[in-house]
Amino acid sequence: MVQIIIFLSLFTITREEIICNAKNYANHSWYCADYNSTLWDSLYSTYGCPLHQTCDFNPSEIYMGEAYGYGQNDSYWEFDSLLECSLAAGNHYCHYIKYDSITGIHPPDWAAGIDCSAFICRCWEVPRVGTWGLYTDYDSIGKEEVEMGDILVKPGSHAVLIEDPGDSPPTGTFSLYESSGSQTLLCYNPLASWSEYSDYSARTLFKTGVASKPSPSLISNGWLKCFPNPFHTSTVISLECIDHVDAAVTRSQHSIRIYDTSGRLIRTFVNKSLTTNYQLLNTVLWDGKDRFGRKLPCGIYLIRAESENYKKTVKVVKLK
């Protein structure tokens, strides 16, 4: 049965909590096995450019900071679970583009990691957007105004999270956190130069000391989550889909479909519900079985949520 809850979200995260989130990602250590690196070299070489023909990480080594994955949005605890399920550690833009052009799947479903904009959204605890979304959906401020927890963004390119803006921004040095393809890891840089970010723009989640509310263009994205993830017997799939409309109430149909990694449809949940200009949360309990009631093997499954104005896919891991 689908349960429907209508509620308003309050964004109450502090600047200190944002930096605490960033530190958790940058200080996260993980072990790279051969099944996270060299065993995937055939795919890296098939879909990679000449610079990225192999995995960035060596087997049997421990790394600090989650792996960079273009288009990926895995939290550090999801990242660990996906590595345990033998996914590859990280991927680059070239893998994303070529794999998508051949298979129609993006980001690569054989890799795990996090990119620059997803990292910032995780730290800000807001729905996932890309660098263009960070640029257009949040308040613009002067670089001389930046504080801890604000960001610098170059739309279509990169974004970084500011820890300490330094003594006289935008001159001198400052400290930042970033998930960088060139660094291959999510990392902390205590001596970044302001001059290297002259073509970046400053954006903030805050206005006059409080967290700003998301703009309609951000809200329309909503979010899709599974908890627990990974899971053994069952997981709760939560879909927050927000449609800002002029009419007080319209009727919309929301579907949640579950696929295996080959693209085979496993299970479908369909719900007709009232959608207003408030947030609508649909939750369904998936028992790890297909539509015929058969228990599914452990592995990675894709949860796809769709409505008229919303599409979102997340990965979920089923354990033994």
Image (spheres, grey):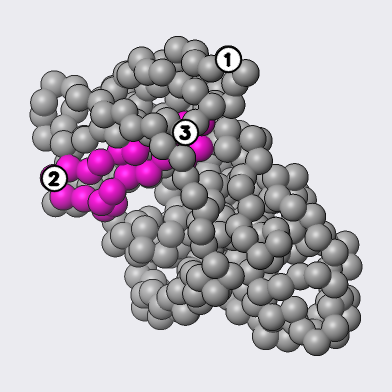
Amino acid under disc 3: Gln
Residue 290 against residue 100 in the figure, above or below:
above
Q: CA distance from mark 3 to mark 2?
A: 29 Å
* Residue 260 among those drawn in magenta: no
Q: Nearer the viewer, mark 3 or mark 2?
A: 3
Ranked by sequence position, the earlier of labels 3 and 1 is 1
Residue 9 appears anywhere in the view: yes
In this view of the protein, can residue 304 be seen by the observer? no
* Residue shown at 46% from the left, 21% from the top: 275
State the residue at coordinates (74%, 52%).
139
Question: Is 248 situated left or right of 2 in this image?
Answer: right
Of the pair 165 and 296, the residue shown nearer to us: 165
Q: Is residue 230 magenta?
A: yes
User: Front-most of 303 and 307?
Assistant: 307
125 with respect to 98 (left or right)? left
Check residue 106 in the rendering and tell me which mark sits there, or answer none.
Answer: none
Instruction: Give the labeled residue for mark 3.
Output: 279
Residue farthest along the top direction in this orientation: 251
- The total of numbered circles placed on residues is 3
Q: Which residue is mark 1?
A: 247
- Could you tell me residue 309's position as x and y percent? 55, 23
Circle 2: element type: loop
**Residue at left offset 25%, top offset 26%:** 2
Report the span colored magenta. 222-242
Give the residue at mark 2.
Answer: 233
